[in-house]
Amino acid sequence: MSWQARLGQWWAEFSLQTKLLVVATLVVSLLMTGITFFALNSIQRDAQRSDTRFARDLGLLLSANVTPLVAEGNDRELAAVADRFWRSSRSLRYIFFADPEGVIYLGIPIGGTAGSSSQLLTRRLELPADIQKRPENPLIRQHLSPDGKVTDVFVPIVSQGRYLGVLALGINPNETLLTSAALTREVTVAVFISIWVLVILGAVFNALTITRPVKELLEGVRSIAGGDFETRLSLPVGGELGELLGGFNMMATQLEVYKAANIEELTAAQIKQQSLIATMADGAVLLDAEGAIVLVNPTARRLFRWEGRNLESKDLIAELPEVLAIELQAALESMVSNSKDSADVRCSFGEPARTLRIVLQAVKDASGESLKGIAMTIQDLTREVELNAAQSRFISNVSHELRTPLFNIKSYVETLHDMGDQLTEAEKKEFLGIANDETDRLTRLVNDVLDLSRLESERVCTLEPLDVAPAIEQTLRTYRLNAEEKGVKLGFDAEAQLPRVLGNWDLLLQVFDNLVGNALKFTPQGGQLMLRVYPWPDQCQLTYNSSDGSSNNSSDSLNDNPSCELTSPLPRLRIEIADSGCGISEADQSRIFERFYRVENAVHTEAGTGLGLAIVRGILEKHGSFIKMASGLGVGTLFWFDLALEDSDSDELQLQADRRRYDYEASSLTRS
């Protein structure tokens, strides 16, 4: 067999990927070699241009220095300058000076013999005729000498328009650039040869050590993909390929173990699902296809009072309270019989009553025919139902309150319109007074609703330093006539100089107006209504108590410590409103500050919307405070709250307001 046939057979054993790799490597090597040669040529051209520029600049420099000497005919000084220039540069091969006819009259170096010297001085330069017309553009050329390439520069010497001759320089090329170019050329050739050698060796190595193991590995991967996890590869191969085969065998072993442990993985996934269900805010119960309990989350246990009980595999209907069991039985039976896929049941049970929404959803297999279980979610709608009921009561109360003054206004106005001529002036005035009172009543109702809505919608209010005493005095002046008519004594107890507080003037006026108005409304004739304002906790002057009990103002002794009976890191101004009215029962005290709640619904003595104290609570929350009360039936009622002083941190007050609002809503939800 010829060597061409053997080479073809050897090449045919390679895979398509290997052949493409070889071709790509050859193409890349050729491309890199071409780029290197191009770069080498560029370097050589740059070196030649650099030599040319250097020779031109050197010639112009020397010409500028010797032109005055040539013009004066000072050959001795000219020779001295040329000699210094020659000695200062290693790049110069020669320096010649020629007259206008081209005859050289001075040259460096000068031959060692007299004959060579005179022969040198009698030579003539053959130059272009137009060289004298371009003194700034010297003639540059290169020639080869026995010692290498030389760059010749011919600079015309012109002084004041007169052509004096030619300066000729011979400059050696830059040895560093020549050496670099030669090195680059040699490295390029070496790299090119190395790449070809590596490609050939790599192809041989691939054919001998890689192709066969890769084929075996491919067959093994196909076996694993077909589900045969017992496949193993055993080849005498080392290095990275051996690690690859070892990794394949390890992968097959792990897959075999995974196949055996599939049930355990499914169990872990079920545990994760159970954990997710356990953290749901709504109640969740999982049932099997027969309606037996599989899983119950903590919320469902709390709603159905199942805490601490083992409910697994027990019938759901038997474990539910009787009322819920009756409501759910029909829906659950329809789900178990596969006649329905979902059901939605709403029911109430327990004391106090709780309203639940129970949603049943069938869980089926991929085909959608076989029932695998039932998922039941429970939502506690008690709070929503109570809020809706409270809203309905409020709308009903407001509607009634609106209807009554509107009916009265309409009745008296119609009477005035229809019987105006038949009524006396006193009757007309009485009718107009009643209509005016009903209009005021209607205005108060609308204002209360608007105030409450504004407080709930505006998260932050502007607080400014202010004196609280004028606001209280203004409120007392407003109600003084009403108090005198009713025979109630108004009192105000406060220090002459109260600290300023951080608050909103208009909102605090509304607080005082609501509290004083309510107190006056429920205080009988001959009663008393008292307002008190004082700092709380009380402030006192810090003193230093020495060890012997005597007072000492110096702090020299280590035993002297400041003390005060009452101190506070955040002093406030306390405001109290006390009346001697009918009082409020304990049952009403727990809900007196709720929206829409009216004490008069129980005592039926005074009318109102039930919004006044809710508005007071909302305003004080925005001031970072809260209102408290103490009351007893037939004794009277005391309301009090604290206001922050003007130096308080407004951000801290806002934080306290948010906390108080959150605590109130949480407590309201708990009471529900």
Image: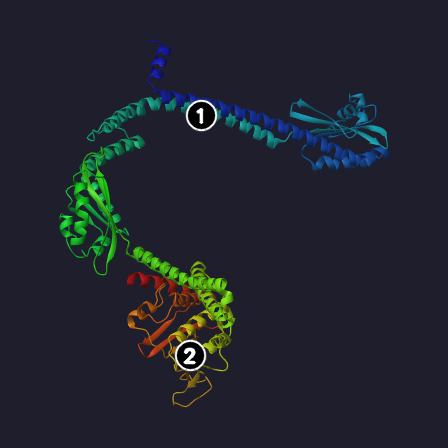
Amino acid found under the numbered disc labelled 1: Ser
Q: Which residue is nearer to you in this view: 649 or 500?
A: 500
Horizontal and vertical percent position of residue 305: 19, 57
Q: Residue 341 is drawn in which quadrant?
A: top left
Question: Which one is nearer the viewer's eye here, 160 or 511?
Answer: 511
Distance of label 1 from label 2 (alpha carbons): 118 Å
Q: In which quarter of the image is the N terminus?
A: top left
The image's colouring method is rainbow
Residue at 17% across, 41% down: 336
Q: Please identify, in this view, whether the residue under mark 1 or under mark 2 is nearer the observer.
A: 2
Asked whether, in this view, residue 63 is left or right of residue 536, the answer is right
Instruction: Identify which amino acid the numbered label 2 is placed on.
Output: Lys
Q: Quadrant of the C terminus?
A: bottom left
Q: Where residue 69 appears, x then y in whole percent?
A: 83, 35
Which one is in front, 93 or 634? Answer: 634
Local secondary structure at mark 2: helix
Q: Is mark 1 on a helix, strand or loop?
A: helix
- Residue at 38% x, 11% y is 4
On the question of residue 235 being in view, the answer is no
| Residue 597 placement, left or right of 312 | right
Q: Which of 545 and 44 is in front in this view?
A: 545
Residue 142: % across, % down:
68, 24
| Residue 469 in sight from this viewpoint | yes
Q: Residue furthest front?
A: 422
Q: How crowded is mark 2: few (under 14 residues within 10 Å), some or many (20 or more)?
A: some
Write down the residue under mark 2.
486
Res 606 quadrant in image: bottom left
- Give the residue number, with chain letter if any, for mark 1: 194
